[in-house]
Structure formats: C-alpha cells, structure tokens
Amino acid sequence: MTNKIFTKEEWTKALQGLSDSYKVFVPVKDGDFHTFKPMNATKAPDFDFQNTRLSARSLVYPQAERMFEYSLDENDPEANIIKETPKDYSPQAIVGIRPCDAHGFKIVKPNFDNKEYRDPWWIQHFESTVLVGLGCNQPCSTCFCASVGGGPFNKDVLDVLIYDLGANFMVSGLTEKGEAFLSKAQGGKAADDAAVKQAEALATEAAKKVKADVPTDKLKDKVINDLFAAPFWQDVGFACLNCGTCTYLCPTCWCFDIQDEVLGKQGDRIRNWDSCMFPLFTLHGSGHNPRDQKFQRVRQRFMHKLKYYVDKYQGGVQCSGCGRCVRYCPVNIDIRQVAELMNNY
Amino acid sequence: MLKGLLEHIGIEPGRLNFSWISSAEATKFVDVAQQVAASVKALGPARYLIKKRAEVA
Amino acid sequence: MIEYTAIIRDTAKKLLKDGKVDVFIGYKKGTVPMMNEPVVISDPEKVDTLHWDSLCGLNLCNYLTKRKDKIGIIANGCNSRNIVTHILENQISREQLYIVGIPCTGVIDHRAVLRAVGNKEVLDVQEQGDKFTVSGNGFSETFDKAKFLRTNCAVCTHRNPVIYDEMVASPVKEQEGVDPFEDVKKIEAMDPEKKWGFFTKMIERCLRCYACRNSCPLCYCPTCFVDESKPQWVGKSIDPTDTMTFHIMRAYHCAGRCTDCGACERVCPVGIPMRQFTKKLNKDALEYFSWEAGLNPDARPPLDVYKPDDYNDFVK
Amino acid sequence: MRGVPLQNPYLPYPVRIDKITTETTDKNLKTFRFVFLNPEDEKKFAYTPGQFAELSVPGKGEIPIGIASSPTEKGFVAFTVNKVGLVTNYMHNMKEGEIMGIRGPLGNWYPWEEMEGKNIVIVGGGFAFTTLRSSIVYMIQPENRARFKDISVVYGARNPGLLLYRDELAEWEKRDDINMHITVDGTDDPDWKYNVGFVPAITEKKITSADNAIAIVCGPPIMIKFTQPVLEKLGFPPERIILSLEMRMKCGIGICGRCNIGDKYVCKDGPVFSLAKLKQMPGEY
C-alpha cells in the first residue's frame, strides 16, 4: 500500500496531469452545493464539502442512457433491427467520492451483476472506474454509515483513500487499480510515520462522531408479511409527496424505466432512472395498479431497502447511510425512524 | 397568457398567433394566414424548444 | 411564530374532542433542523405532536384533495388561498373544513440561512420573535427573520388567511409598497435569446423528480400529462427540451390558480427557482384580469369564464 | 478486468412476423407467429412452457407476453396479444412480413418435474390461456404424453367468440387422452355444444379428485379468486395449486426493479408461483 503526501495545490496539479489517462471527475462548487464535474483547468476542484448533493451513482449508471438504436427507414435494409449503441468505456476516476457513496456501488452490484444476468452497461462503467475516496473528517449529524456496515473512512469499495490532514492530503492506494492510478500522479512524497499516524487518528476520531445509531440488526429475523402488515405505514406515508427526491438522490436506488424515442426515422431505446414513488411505476396495461395508494409506495421503498434486500442478498440493508434522503426529503420522512419502527416491530 | 409565458421564456413574439375567424370569413382567414406566415418567415427557423435526438449518455 | 404552537395544540385538541373534526392536519417538528413534517392527527391525546414555526414552508392544502372526512387544518395566507381554490375546483367542500387561521409573518428561506453560515451544517435553530439563532459545530449566529424570508414571503401581500373559522392570533399588518414582480420585469426586459438562456440555465440541473409538481396543491390530476403514454406528450429522459416542456406545461396549468406559496421552490432538491415561470403568469393575471388567485370563494377564476370585456389584444 | 459480457440480455433477437391470426370475434386478440431472422437465434431461444418473452417493437417499446407456442413446435414461436396499450395497439396494425424483436425466454416455467407422473388439472379463463395452450400442446405430444397421467382442462370465456384457439379446442375435445371442459359464461348460440357456467362452478362439477393431482390456474383475478376455494375444497394443498402472475415489467431479468412482490421478482422468480409460495408473499399484485 502506497501512502503519499501531497499539498493541496500539488494534488490539484496531479489530478490535472491524470486527466491525460483518465476522465477525472471532481467535486466542484455549483451554486449552493457540490457536484461531480469533469476536471478542467477553469474550475478548480473543491474538496471542502460535506457531500455532493447528488451521489456519484450517475457516473456509473447515468440518469438517462441510450441502450440501443435503430433505423425506421423502410429503405434501410437493416430497418427495425435493434442494435447496440457504441459506448466509451475508457478509464474514469471519481475523485472525492465519500466512502458511503462508494459503498453504495457495492450494495447495488448484486442487482446488476449476478450469476443469472449481467447488465453490460453498469458493469463496464463500473469496471472502468477508479474510486478515489475522501474520508469524512466531519460526518454530518444525519450520517449513519457506521450503522449499515460502512464508516467515514471505510476502505471497502475504494481504490484510493484520501485523508485530509489540513494543509496536506495523504493519499493511500488500496487496490491494484488504485495503485496504478496513484503511480501516474505527479508530485507528492512518500508519507512518513507521523502522517500515517495522524491519518489514522483522524479516522478514529471521525468514527466516534458518527452518532446516529440506526438499528437494523433484527430486520433479518422478521417475517416479510408481518412487517408488510404493520400498522405504521399509513402514518409513515401521510406526508409523502411521492416525488422522486429520495430515490434519485440515493446512491443505492437502481430502478429504471425503458423508453423508445423516435426522431424522424431514427429510433433510440433509452433507459431512465425510475422511482417506486411514482404511481406509474407499477401501473398495468389493464389499468390495475398493485400499488395505487401513496402509503403502499412508501412502504415499498422502505421494505425494499430494509427487508426485501436483506432477505434476498443476506448482506445487510440496501442503504449506505449517506443521509441524503433524511436531509433532502421535502417533507422530512426520516429513514432512521422508519428503520427503528421496523426493527423494533 | 400562454403567449405571455412562451414569450417570457424566449419564444419570439410572432411565433404564436391567435385569431377568431368564422367559417364565413374566408378573406380574413387568408389575410391572417398570410400575416402569420410572413411574421414567422421573418423570424427565421425556430431555435428554441425543438426536440433533437435525446441528449443522454 | 413559534408561539402559535401551543394555541394550535389546544385548538386541535378541542376540535377533536368535541367531534367537530375527524382529523387535524398540521406540522410536526422535523428530525432535521429547518425541516418539518406534515402530520395528520385523529387522537386528541396526540396533539402535542403539532408544531408551528417559521420554517413550515409547504402547502398543507395539498393533503386535502378529495378527502371525505371532516378536517381541521391550519392555514396561513397562501395556504388559505389554495383552500379557496380547492373549494372552487370541487376538490374539497367548505363544510368539511375547520380552518385554523395563522397570521403569517413569513417563512424563513432555509437555503439563505445555509448560505449565510457558509453551508456549514446547522444543528439547531431557535426562533425568538422576529429573530432566530442558528448554531452548529463551532458557530452560533443570530439573524433578523425579516432579512431571511423566502423571496415569495418577502413580497407577500396576503399574510392573513382569507378564509378561516378561527384565528390563532390577531391579524398581522399586511406589507405595503412591495413590488412582487420586480424579478419578472427584469426578465421581461431581456431579448428572446437572453430569456431563453436564462431559463435554460435555470432548469439545467432538474432531475425530473417532480417534487415541485407534487408539492403543489394545484397539481392533483389523476394522471399528469408527463405520465401519459397514449399519447406521450413529453419524453421521460432528462433531455433539456423535454425538461423545459415539463416546466412550461406545469407552470401553465397553474395559470390564474397559483398563490405563490413557494412550496415548489422549497421542496426542490437542487434549488431551482421555478417560480420564475408561475410568477409571470401571476403578473399577467393581475394585469389583464385584475386577478389574484384564491382571494374570493365566490368569484370564478378568469380562465374559467368568458367576459365580453376580457383582455383580447393578442387576437388578430 | 473481466471481459465484456458475452451476451447483452436487453438485446432482442430480430424476428419477422410470419403469420397473424385473429383469435376472437371482437378482434382484440391476435396470435403472432414469429420466425427468427437468424436461424441460430431459435436455438438460443430454447424455452419451456410457462415462460414469457419481451416483444420488442422498435419505436414503441417492449411488452412481456407469455409464450403460446410449445417448444415441440419447431420453426417459429407464437404469442397471443391482447390489444390494451401502446405497443399492443401498434402490433395489431402490423402486417405479416414486418420486422420486430423478441427477447427471452424469460422467467420460470410450470413445475414440469413435479408434474411428471401426476394427474394434471388445467384451469384457464379468457385470454390468459396462452401458456396453458403451450403446456397442453407440449404434454399431448406422443413423446411426452406418457410422462403425465390424466389431463383435465377447464377453459372458459365470456362467450364462444372470445375463446382462443377454437380449432385446436375442437380437436382436443375429440381426443381421448385429454378431458376437455370448455365453458362460456353465457351464450345465445343454440348450437353451443359445450358447458355454460363460470369456470369455478364448472371446475367444481367436473374435477372430482385432487388425488395425485396438480392444478395450474391462469385467468383474470376474479376467476382465480373464486377457483382457489374450489380447488382447496377438492383437496388440493397450496403447494399443488400453481398460478402464473402478471405484473408491469420492463427489463424482464430482475434488474429494473418494478415487478417485485416482496423479495421476489415476478419476471425472474416468477411468473409461476405455487399458492403456498404466494401466501408467504405480500398480497401486492
């Protein structure tokens, strides 16, 4: 494992250099919040943030992605034959991703990549991505990564981990992919023991700060139908607007819709993020809707994250504890409280 | 109000036109159609709110 | 306005106990600073959940649509105007409602507060009269509420409810001399290219999560035009033209109905000021038809009725 | 890095519409017979009765439809399509010779291993008879027939004109290795020679024993609702009542997330479930 020290200016420079070999995405301040944008000379990366408003999920799994294309031109001998759209899978790096968001990729992986079916787009985007994480020195009060198998300096899914030591960054290569990335970074010097100690202390300190202790331990022992029939769902769902904020901001939501779009004789098949909060999500052609009521959709979201996923994959809950849905739910429906209700039911 | 809104977001005045024409008012229809065609031609091809191939990844 | 909380609780308790209402709709204190959660209460013993402060910025009228029971609800100026609109549009009947009026001094713009503290995490907000104190790790600052009002509240001229059964306090003085359309006029002065550029940039970040639509009490259609598939009016990706079409159409469906309550902007996860669309319509409704939505339960909205003297200069 | 997955599970096989048959007098149901443009795709599309596929119309979209043909019928694959939505309406206006796509086979199938050596009771209603047709054709093939004991079929529709596959039904009726009980809710046809009555009632009358039997039920929700108690009364345990579900689907491969009932995806873990299994799942379908 390589540990290198960069001053913050050096690191920005190094990232500029790395842009020759990788598409480098960095957090950039964009109005009131931070967003991942491709590294460029005009706008400097800003690593002083709590978390990006949107998770980095769209860099591996875009909100709207062309799957196939086809011609509808009768004169085209290949008319109506659906073909794969060529894609660019050159290496990319997400620099500054928080460990919770990286953990999100691990959570969704069995959905996109399992022994029965492999989603070619997600897999190829994911495999071409280097995850360069930034540890959280100051976790938010709404963070609960530690309750769901992560932590503010969790190395689990990261290829590289950055420790913010104040004036300097200590950058650690964690995987082969990460070491390769780091080896191409110009500048910096080997970290001495003092720096490593300081970094470790930061991680220990941060771990203590993640206060929210969200109980999920008993979820796996519950019976699906018992939780499903629990009396609290109407109350939990009352305020819900059925907007897509929680699901679109979530690093672990994966649902999508498939739509055909035609312009003249050119057709595209596109997949778009979808949300279980929308009534249309489950509306049958016949007009029947198994989840036509708001509370049913709210129940679906929480049951999926905190029970169905738990039973299906037996690897914890489908939540990385990033706290976005807690902070940005327009009506303050709080997954931490729902987890408690479910866990203690 | 639709005209007001569309012009407010940048659709040029003259692209959206309204008229009351009775089925008996043939000449008025011709006049209005010519006026509309002329005003739209003068503006040139529309630039905004035109769906092209979806801009997606 | 936090002092209204106790009165709201008492009133709700009485209404529920006396059987005047089946349920009471209000807010409960949020789990996160500056966020509150709409709540419905049917048990008079649970009224202590109810809460009101200067951060209750949604529109509770949204929760009334097509309900069948008798409902107690709190309403400030804009919320009450939406209730009037709901009654006019047959989404709820006046007889079902017991409206507890709130003389409103405006809602705090939580984004402006965050900006003022350098986007540091706010851990606590305490409201004291016309001031409030926000604190977090290593900071604590006190602000004048008047300087941190949401932009719609800052120019609001209907702070008192227009319809109510009782008030939690005496009416507040309405603001005078404010120009609600200053920003609209600025855009009106631009040339088409600038206007298009302004609005394109404004909605660039839209996720199509539809929080703006769903938080709006006017948007109660069983199937929204964006969700129709036969025919499909608008594409579902985040293509900029489709996104713009959604915003234009959403706004236009609010023509002559919008009360500028600000819920749409409040809920947007990416902070789009989409009131710039509806405000233009509000301005035109006022100029062409002398109309402000939801002021009078007995007047039909201008786009509902034809009058011989309707503005029609745009007709060739 | 692992290599590119060999097969894109979302990519449909191109097919040509070989034959279109209008099935019902109201013209709302048509059977489409498809031929693969690339003959090798037919081998890849090896299916078992009970499975479904996504019919893929370029420019319109995809719809999940049960496979109506039997794997014993070679050279084509057939689907019976009800005119309800965007894609199906478009398909009903398509002509023989046109090109589209099919993607599959998808989902699980009827429990054929378990069904071997048993009496088979098939209960079907309306246009949900498609995968049941597939199953019947499959079972009565000479090479398969001996694997099953008695085969009884109760199939009903609202009126005679709404029965699917009427020519085949008449043929099966003549055979002595399958007990056909065709019924309609009502008819004014004086020449109607089969049963009149709702499917649950006819099932109660004609099916006499649950001994060593397994029941496969496909039909509208109302039919399923009333057939279930009949079968239970006959002595079918929930493990031996097999149902096939419908759900809004997109990907068909358990990834897009919309067709779940509890922790099961109807597209991948279903569409075929035993009643016993369904009872352990939330009733959200």
Image: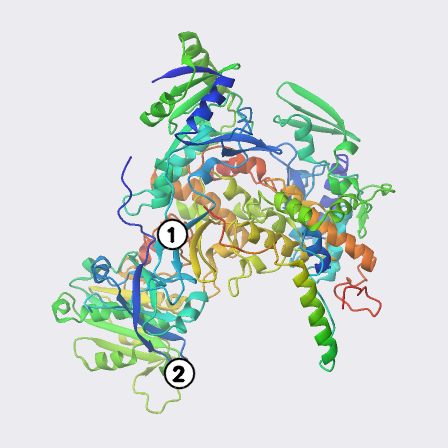
* Residue for point 34% across, 76% down: D156
Q: Is residue A26 above or below residue C22?
A: above
Instruction: Determine which residue is flagged by label 1.
Output: D281
* SS state under label 1: loop
Residue D203 x/y as whole percent: 31, 73
Q: Is residue C72 visible?
A: no
Residue D150 x/y as whole percent: 18, 71
Quadrant assignment for the N terminus of chain A: top left
Snapshot quadrant of residue C175: top right
Colour convention: rainbow
Q: Is residue A64 left or right of residue A120?
A: right
* Residue for point 67% across, 25% down: C117
Q: Amino acid at mark 2?
A: Gly
Residue under mark 2: which chain is it in? D
Along the line of sight, the residue nearer the viewer: C39 or A127: A127
Residue C26 x/y as whole percent: 68, 44
Q: Is residue C223 left or right of residue A130?
A: right
Q: Is residue A339 above or below residue A78?
A: above
* SS state under label 2: loop
Q: Amino acid at mark 1?
A: Met
* Residue for point 71% across, 23% down: C141
First reached walking from the N terminus: tag 1 or tag 2? 2
Snapshot quadrant of residue B19: bottom right
Residue under mark 1: which chain is it in? D
**For the residues marked 1 and 2, what is the alpha-carbon distance in whole angstroms?**
35 Å
Kindly indicate whether the residue at mark 2 contacts the one at mark 1 (C-beta within 8 angstroms).
no
Disc ID at residue B4: none
Near mark 2 (Cα within 10 A), the count class, few <14, some 14-19 or many ≥20, is some
Residue D79 x/y as whole percent: 31, 68
Instruction: Determine which residue is flagged by label 2.
Output: D186
